[in-house]
Image: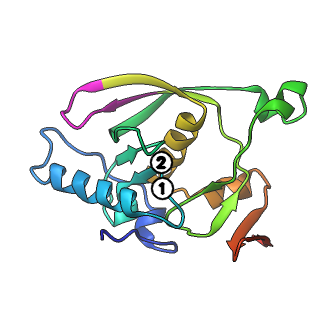
Amino acid sequence: MSKIIEAPNPVLSGKAQAVRLPFPSDLPGILHQMEKALIQARDPKGVGLAAPQIGLSLRIFIAKPTDKSKIQVFINPKILKIYKTPDHGLKSKKAKKVKRIMEGCLSLPHYYGPIVRARKVNIEFLDEDGVKQKKTFSGLDSQIVLHEIDHLNGMLFVDRLLEQKKPLYEFIDGEWEKVEL
């Protein structure tokens, strides 16, 4: 199994390095290692993984939102636009209808928090063939993209929890326990 790095580890808190063109010859091996680690993750089950999470300071992440999804590769992603949504204010009637999930991280197993993220984001990135892409993601896909880009910038989801003054929970033996930050 490809080992996922757990916090605290310096590679998780540093800004990852851009991947230069032409891509290094070991890129397919790196992507295979990341895919293997993501698919094998069970506790929690993973939907995204950034290269720093396997110990490589590279601006690469992969995403697989569902079991049936094809793995998507994102190299050197840049956020072009974050769409502000009603859930940022948390007081509007629409905000009450927004489905919130407990976000977790493979590098912080068993820890979760109710992070508020933009429901829509537009990014530019290179795919595994080096072709520039521009795409807009919404819902869970937006949350995954923003979470993984945070990893590439040396930020963990607990850093976002602290920013947003949200609680952190540990899931132990089927029970949620609040953890002091």
Task: Tell whether label 1 touches label 2 (CB within 8 Å).
Answer: no
Residue 27, x across and y down, in percent: 17, 50
Q: Relative to 64, does residue 136 appear above or below in the rendering? A: above
Q: Which residues are magenta?
A: 123-132
Whether residue 176 appears in magenta in the rendering, the answer is no
Q: Which SS class for mark 2?
A: helix
Q: Within 10 Å of the Cα at label 1, are there few (<14), some (14-19), or many (20+) other Cα atoms?
A: many
- Work out which quarter of the rendered image holds the N terminus and state it: bottom left
- Which numbered circle lies on residue 165? none
Which residue is label 2 attached to? 148
Q: Is residue 56 above or below residue 85?
A: below
**In the drawing, does residue 159 fall left or right of residue 73?**
right
Residue found farthest to the left: 25
Q: Amino acid at mark 2?
A: Glu
Badge count: 2
Residue 33's spot in the image, x, y percent?
25, 59
Q: Determine the residue positioned at 54% across, 56% down.
A: 155
Please name which of the two marks, 2 or 1, marks the residue nearer to the observer: 1
**Residue 144 pos. (x, y %):** 52, 43
Where does label 1 land, which residue? Answer: 46
Q: Residues within 10 Å of mark 2 (few under 14, many from 20)?
A: many
Q: In the image, is residue 130 part of the stretch drawn in magenta?
A: yes
Q: Is residue 164 left or right of residue 6?
A: right
**Sequence order check: which comes first, mark 2 or mark 1?**
1
Q: Amino acid at mark 1?
A: Gly
Q: At x 51% / y 74%, what residue is drawn?
A: 8
